[in-house]
Image (cartoon, rainbow, N blue to C red):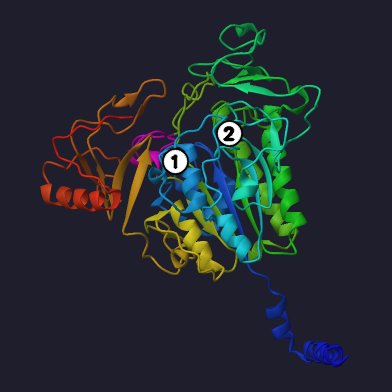
Amino acid sequence: MKVKGIIKILILQAILLSCNAPEQNKEVVEQKAPNVIIIYADDLGYGDVGAYGSTELKTPNIDRLANGGMRFTNGYASSATCSPSRYALLTGQYPWRNKNAKILPGTAPLLISTQQMTIPKMLKQSGYHTGIVGKWHLGLGDGQVDWNQHISPGPNEVGFDYAYIMAATQDRVPTVYIENGKVVNLDPNDPIEIDYSKNFEGEPTGKDNPELLKMKWHHGHNNSIVNGIPRIGFMKGGESAKWVDEDMADHFLGKAQEYIKGHKDEPFFLYYALQQPHVPRTPHPRFVGKSGMGPRGDVIVEADWCIGEFIKTLETEGLLENTLIILSSDNGPVLNDGYYDDAVEKLGKHTPAGPLRGGKYSLFEAGTRVPFITYWEGEIQPGVSDALVSQIDFLASLAALTDSDVQVGDSQNLLDVFKGKSEKGRDNLVLEATSRTAFRKGDWAMIPPYKGPAVIKTVNIEIGNANEFQLYNLKEDIGEQNNLAESNPEKLEEMIAEFESIRGIEYKETEKLELK
C-alpha cells in the first residue's frame, strides 16, 4: 500500500508540474525526433535533373528539394551498379568487402547478414518505426525460396518493421509485390515457380514468342513474358499476384503515402526506393509522351511527379518541417539497357551524365557521381556544397542525428556537412564497378589498369578499362579527358599508396588486372 501511495503522489506531482510548465517547455517536450526519409532513384544520372544542369528534361519537384536544401556536386553512390550500392547505403560498408555484393539474380539469398548493423536497425534502437517501400534487390531467404510461403529472411530481419517491395528489379522475375514476407494477392491454387536456368514446359518466352510482346528485347531480356514484356528468368503461376508495370509508380507512391500517414505520430524512417528510370521503362499512360524523349524521359517525369505528390503528403500531414529528406540515385545513367525503347533515338540534346564521362557499370565519374540532395525545411539552409560525400556515410551521420553510439567502419559522420554547417567532407573514397575499384581523393581520380573491353558495346558505355593507370584532375578536367598518370608520377604514386592501404592489395604499374 505504501508503494502504491507513493506512486500516486509522484503521478499527481508530475501532472501538476506539466500543467504549470511554460508553453515553451511544453513545445520542447512534445517535439518528437526528426523523421528520416531516403528517396532512392534507380539509374538516374547526374545530368538527368534540372538542378544539375538538365535543360531538356524538366524535374521541378526534385529541383524544389535541391534548390531548397543542400545540393552536393561531389555526392557518390558506392558502386556503379544496383545491389552493391543498396548494400552500402543500408550497412555503411564498402560493397567490395563482401564478395557476394554484385548484381543479384531474383533468386539470390539475402546479401545483408541478419547480424549486421543497418540504418533501420540503428534507428529502431533509437525509437523509430522503420519502413521500406519499393525496390529491394538485396536477396531474400537462403537461396531456396518457396514464394508461396512466408519468405524469410528479408527486409524485416535486417531492421525494417514494415516492408512492401519487389524482390529484385522490374525486369526480373518474380514479378510480384511482397509485403512483410508474403506475396500480395497470391492464389494458393496457382502457386509460383521460379527458375533462372531453364524454362517451364509450355511457358512462352520473349525469344520464342515475339508475337506476344508489346516491348521488344535488345539483349538479355528474352525469358518469361509478363504483361507483354520479356524478363530475365523464368516464372510460372501466380497470375493474380503479378503486377501491372504501368501502375507500379502509382502503387509504390500510394504505399509510401500510407506509411507516413500511419506513423506520423511517432518518429519514422522510410526508405522509398523508386524503380525509375530502370528498365523496363513503363510510364503510366498519363505520362506517355510528356518528355518528348520516349519512355526513359517519360518515367523520369513520372518519378519527379511521384516525389512531388509525396512531398505534398508530408506537407498536408504537417510533417515537412520535422523531416530530413535525402534524395539520391543508386548509380549513373544508361540508355539501352536491354530493351528497344527509343532511349537513344529520342535523346536529342539531353545528356544524362551531364559533363561526366561513362555511366552505369563504369569506373569513370558518371558511374557513381549522382544527384545527391539533403532537405530539411527550416533546418538546412539552401546552398550548394562541393564536399566529397558518399551514401556509405548515411549510417554514421544518422546515428549522430539520433544520438546513437553505433559505429560502422567505413561510414563517416558527415551530419554537419549534410546539414550545410560544414564543408569538410570525406578525405577519400573507394569507388566500385562490377568487381573493379578506383580511388577518389581531393580533386583527383585514379583508375588502376584492368584487362577487358574498354566499352560495353550492348549499352555503349566506357567502363574505365585500360592497360595503364589513369589519373585525372577533376577540378580542371571533370570529363576525364586528359590522363596525367605519366606527366604527374608523384601524385600517381601518392594515390596508389593510399588506395593500396585501404584496399589491402598491391598494384604494380605494369600489372594488368583481369576483369572478373
Residue 171 versus residue 339: which sits nearer the camera? 171
| 163 or 109: nearer the viewer | 109
Q: Residue at x 59, y 57 (%)?
A: 121
Q: Is residue 128 above or below residue 447?
A: below
Q: How many marks?
A: 2
Q: Amino acid at mark 2?
A: Ala
Give how far across and how far down residue 400 sits, in percent. 50, 68
Task: Identify the residue position indicated by label 1 in the image.
Answer: 47
Q: Give the main secondary structure, helix, strand or loop, of the magenta stretch.
A: loop
129 over 202 or under it: above or below: below
- SS for dot 1: loop
Going by the image, does 471 lie left or right of 135? left
Residue that appears at 70% across and 34% down: 177
Magenta stretch in the rendered image: 351-368
Is 358 magenta? The answer is: yes
* Nearest to viewer (mark 1 / mark 2): 2
Quadrant in the rendering for residue 175:
top right
- Residue 60: where, in percent of width, then height? 58, 47
Query: Is 195 covered by the magenta stretch?
Result: no
Give the residue number, with chain letter if any, for mark 2. 168
Please state which of residues 5 and 437 is positioned toward the viewer in this rendering. Answer: 5
Q: Is residue 340 above or below residue 268?
A: above
Quadrant housing the C terminus: top left
Which residue occupies 75% across, 64% down? 265
Give me the residue at 40% from left, 39% from top.
99
Counting residues from the N terminus, which is met first, the one under dot 1 or under dot 2? Answer: 1
